[in-house]
């Protein structure tokens, strides 16, 4: 032993202690450097461990979402959703600049057409930029799918739920996402400011999931929502009146505050969004079907009908089923109908109800579901009770009070009532007695016309059908004119106009009100008879706007879209006259109108317009010709690609890429053309294709083509594809961190304080900024809409740059969703 400072040390112990201490500090220093990676690894290990523990619950949620999604459409009793669906797409918003190195490809379509989010039926047919639901989910964390009743919002959510539940062919960001597919009316009774915002979701899911998966359900939900691995697909917000939407907005604010990484997609009305936009929710209009998509839907329905119903029935009854080709020949795909209306129409046709109108098809649908035992008067009274109460769901007792005084025939045998109610999976504990009102409700639940929600409440399976029945109950509409904010009231007017097209109520409703209501009235007139007085009244109101060649081109396009989508047969004559008008605006409107309606009588005149002295008329004629499936029209578009001026070539290339089904093959051939301008246009054209071979082909052209002009176009197209996510993603950068806003404030000698409002600075950017600053300001304004921006935006509707004009129009539309009572119109 040795003595050190009076201590007796053992040699072996000393060296062991010394080596241990040295090793300890060495390991600690190494851990300090590797600690971030080690911590992330431990975090992932615990996450995967928890996922393995909750795997059974997650699987049950995905299977439940898939099962309910496949039955969440009008014809669920006939076909699964995947068998009949036309994959839904969303209209992309205007593209803000990506900075000083903006490599976006110029699009002729965007120079000609305003976005027209309020008229997707018009703009979708002309090749507007659209996004798949997965593409949109990759760019925005929170999305409101906006559309009219029957446009397919619920089906879009169900389709996305099916894709995420199956986990097949998903991009990397979506492989671990779990769809939570619910209707708002299922969570609404459990909402309380004093409970965790996940509690209503948990309690709603327990109605659908097996008991074995429920013990770990709440733990799974908290883990998934906290980590951003859950996608809440919330249906039904479009069914709420404004006074109920405020509660829903408050609930979502609480949910997103407590679980900020939550991914959210919800269905929303195109009339009013309350404060949803301020929650960072991006409103995206649902794209309407094109002519080709309608034809594909008709073909699919006809084939499935004969396969599952027509042929088996003919074998039993010797009745020959309708031939697919005959059905395709009967159905005219030109009218502007919603997907719901096309479903009702083709269903009625195949079932033997040779309906010539959509109202007839709706009647046939209701009769098929309910039969003669349920009188239409009772159904109309029930539907009107929902509208009058301003509630999307009612208790059986509330509904029974509405039908108690009616003379109701027996719906079901009284001796079997109790047995049916006990066995029915859709019945509620409240619907138990054998009273006539309850028998009707039970029959409607079994038929699928009503659905059950939490707290023993009932709602119509589709508000569109509810509004149709309620319109039958009314003789006159309320005398308060103005644009309704509740989609059910809006659809009620839509069906009331079809049933009462001769009454003077329509003029009283429209006269003296805003232009916005006038344009909405064209939608209300869509199902009216061909010679209805309502149609002539509307045309008299809109024609001065179209004929006066307004200073604001956006007004003319909106008026054209409103007219073209009314299904008015007299429009073909008007558009043919305008094809030879002296003013270029009228020739442009006529060309687009004839193309939208596929007027074969105007085909030769449209080909002549490809040589019009005005650029935009030539471009418009090219987009119009792309609507026809006629060899003569397709040949004219190909000649425009080969021999036209630059704008016409680019328009032809875009039309081939986005509208004409065989356009991809034509563009591939044009890539090897001798003319360099044709090759350049084809390069820009294929950049619009979603095909997987495009990027590889552009890389080859950027290296191998003999002409610099073509190589440069291919390089720019590649950069545009690589930066696509940058300009589609909304600005989530705080104003004080936005480089363009900091630079603009510096030019004015100002600074930006974190947390302080920048409304005044954004207003100055709209007024004094250059075009890129104006576009960037409008992108930021759309995330925080305020009425103070309305006047500067209206001024920009007269701007020389069409991109600035169109973006201002779109931004005003977003503002109108938050403040619909304000005069936010062009």
Image: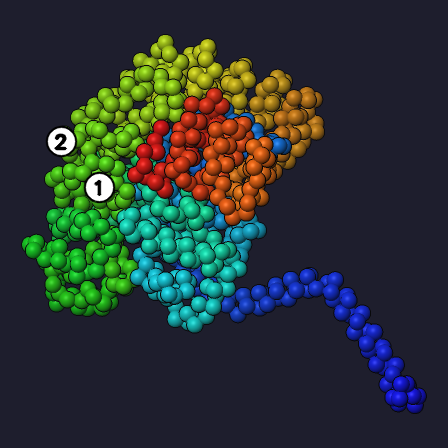
Residue shown at 13% from the left, 55% from the top: 402
Pointer 1 and pointer 2: residues touching (CB < 8 Å)? Answer: no
**Which residue occupies the extreme front position in the image?**
749
Going by the image, does 405 lie left or right of 427?
left
The answer to whether residue 441 is visible is yes
Among the 4 quarters of the image, the one containing residue 538:
top left
Which residue is more in the foreground, 276 or 122?
A: 276
Label 1: which residue?
492
In the image, what residue occupies the spot 57% across and 27% down?
A: 684
Residue 477 point in image, percent of width and height: 15, 39
Residue 502, position in %: x, y? 14, 29
Badge 1: few (under 14), some or many (20 or more) residues near its Cα, within 10 Å? many
Q: Give the residue at x 30% y 42%.
A: 149
| Figure check: 694 above or below 609 | below
Whichever of callouts 1 and 2 sits on the residue coming sooner in the sequence is 1
Q: Secondary structure at mark 1?
A: helix
- Does residue 88 appear in this view? no
* Image position of 320 (left or right of 405): right
The residue pinned by badge 2 equals 503
Label 2 crowd (10 A; few <14 / some 14-19 / many >=20): some
């Amino acid at each position: 032993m040795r003595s050190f400072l009076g201590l007796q040390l053992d040699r072996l112990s000393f060296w062991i202690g010394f080596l241990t201490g040295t090793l300890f500090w060495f390991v600690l220093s190494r851990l300090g450097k590797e600690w971030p990676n080690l911590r992330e690894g431990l975090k992932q290990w615990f996450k995967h461990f928890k996922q393995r523990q909750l795997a059974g619950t997650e699987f049950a949620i995905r299977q439940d979402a898939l099962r309910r999604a496949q039955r969440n459409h009008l014809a669920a009793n006939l076909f699964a959703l995947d068998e009949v669906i036309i994959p839904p797409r969303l209209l992309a918003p205007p593209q803000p600049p990506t900075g000083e190195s903006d490599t976006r490809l110029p699009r002729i379509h965007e120079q000609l057409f305003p976005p027209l989010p309020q008229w997707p039926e018009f703009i979708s047919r002309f090749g507007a930029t659209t996004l798949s639901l997965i593409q949109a989910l990759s760019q925005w964390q929170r999305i409101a799918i906006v559309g009219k009743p029957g446009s397919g919002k619920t089906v879009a959510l169900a389709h996305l739920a099916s894709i995420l539940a199956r986990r097949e062919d998903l991009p990397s960001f979506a492989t671990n996402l779990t769809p939570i597919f619910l209707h708002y009316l299922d969570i609404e009774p459990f909402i309380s400011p004093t409970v965790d915002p996940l509690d209503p979701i948990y309690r709603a899911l327990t109605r659908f999931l097996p008991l074995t998966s429920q013990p770990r359900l709440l733990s799974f939900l908290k883990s998934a929502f906290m980590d951003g691995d859950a996608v809440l697909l919330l249906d039904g917000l479009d069914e709420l009146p404004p006074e109920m939407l405020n509660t829903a907005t408050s609930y979502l604010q609480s949910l997103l505050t407590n679980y900020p990484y939550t991914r959210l997609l919800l269905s929303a009305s195109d009339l009013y969004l309350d404060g949803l936009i301020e929650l960072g929710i991006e409103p995206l209009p649902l794209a309407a079907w094109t002519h080709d998509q309608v034809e594909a839907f008709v073909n699919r329905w006809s084939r499935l009908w004969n396969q599952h119903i027509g042929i088996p029935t003919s074998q039993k009854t010797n009745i020959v089923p309708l031939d697919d080709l005959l059905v395709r020949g009967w159905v005219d795909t030109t009218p502007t109908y919603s997907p719901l209306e096309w479903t009702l129409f083709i269903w009625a046709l195949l079932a033997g109800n040779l309906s010539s109108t959509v109202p007839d098809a709706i009647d046939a649908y209701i009769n098929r579901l309910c039969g003669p035992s349920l009188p239409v008067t009772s159904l109309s009274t029930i539907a009107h009770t929902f509208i009058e109460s301003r509630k999307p769901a009612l208790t059986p007792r509330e509904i029974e009070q509405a039908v108690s005084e009616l003379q109701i025939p027996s719906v079901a045998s009284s001796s079997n009532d109790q047995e049916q109610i006990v066995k029915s999976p859709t019945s509620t504990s409240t619907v138990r007695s054998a009273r006539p009102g309850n028998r009707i409700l039970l029959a409607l639940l079994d038929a699928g016309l009503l659905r059950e929600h939490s707290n023993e409440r009932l709602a119509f399976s589709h508000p569109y059908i509810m509004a149709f029945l309620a319109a039958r109950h009314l003789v006159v509409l309320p005398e308060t004119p103005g644009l309704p904010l509740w989609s059910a009231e809006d659809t009620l007017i839509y069906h009331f106009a079809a049933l009462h097209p001769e009454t003077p109520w329509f003029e009283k409703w429209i006269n003296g009100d805003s232009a916005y209501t006038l344009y909405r009235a064209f939608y209300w007139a869509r199902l009216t008879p061909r010679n209805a007085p309502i149609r002539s009244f509307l045309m008299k109101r809109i024609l001065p706007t179209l004929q006066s060649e307004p200073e604001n081109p956006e007004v003319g396009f909106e008026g054209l879209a409103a007219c073209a989508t009314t299904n008015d047969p007299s429009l073909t004559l008007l558009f043919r006259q305008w094809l030879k008008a002296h003013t270029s605006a009228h020739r442009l409107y006529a060309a687009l109108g004839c193309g939208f309606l596929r007027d074969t009588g105007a085909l030769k005149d449209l080909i002549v317009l490809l040589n019009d002295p005005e650029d935009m008329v030539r471009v418009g004629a090219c987009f119009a010709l792309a609507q026809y499936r006629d060899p003569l029209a397709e040949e004219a578009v190909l000649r425009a690609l080969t021999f036209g001026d630059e704008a016409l070539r680019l328009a032809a290339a875009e039309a081939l890429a986005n509208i004409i089904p065989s356009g991809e093959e034509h563009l591939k051939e044009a890539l090897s053309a001798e003319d360099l301008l044709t090759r350049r246009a084809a390069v820009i054209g294929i950049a619009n294709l979603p095909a997987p071979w495009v990027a590889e082909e552009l890389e080859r052209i950027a290296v191998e083509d003999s002409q610099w002009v073509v190589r440069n176009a291919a390089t720019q197209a590649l950069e545009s594809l690589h930066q696509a996510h940058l300009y589609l993603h909304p600005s989530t950068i705080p104003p004080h961190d936005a480089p363009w806003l900091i630079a603009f404030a510096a030019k004015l000698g100002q600074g930006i304080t974190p947390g302080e409002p920048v409304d005044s600075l954004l207003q100055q950017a709209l007024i004094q900024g250059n075009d890129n600053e104006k576009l960037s300001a409008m992108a930021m304004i759309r995330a925080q809409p305020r009425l103070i921006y309305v006047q500067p935006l209206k001024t920009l509707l007269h701007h020389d740059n069409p991109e600035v004009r169109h973006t201002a129009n779109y931004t005003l539309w977003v503002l109108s969703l938050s403040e619909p009572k304000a005069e936010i119109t062009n």
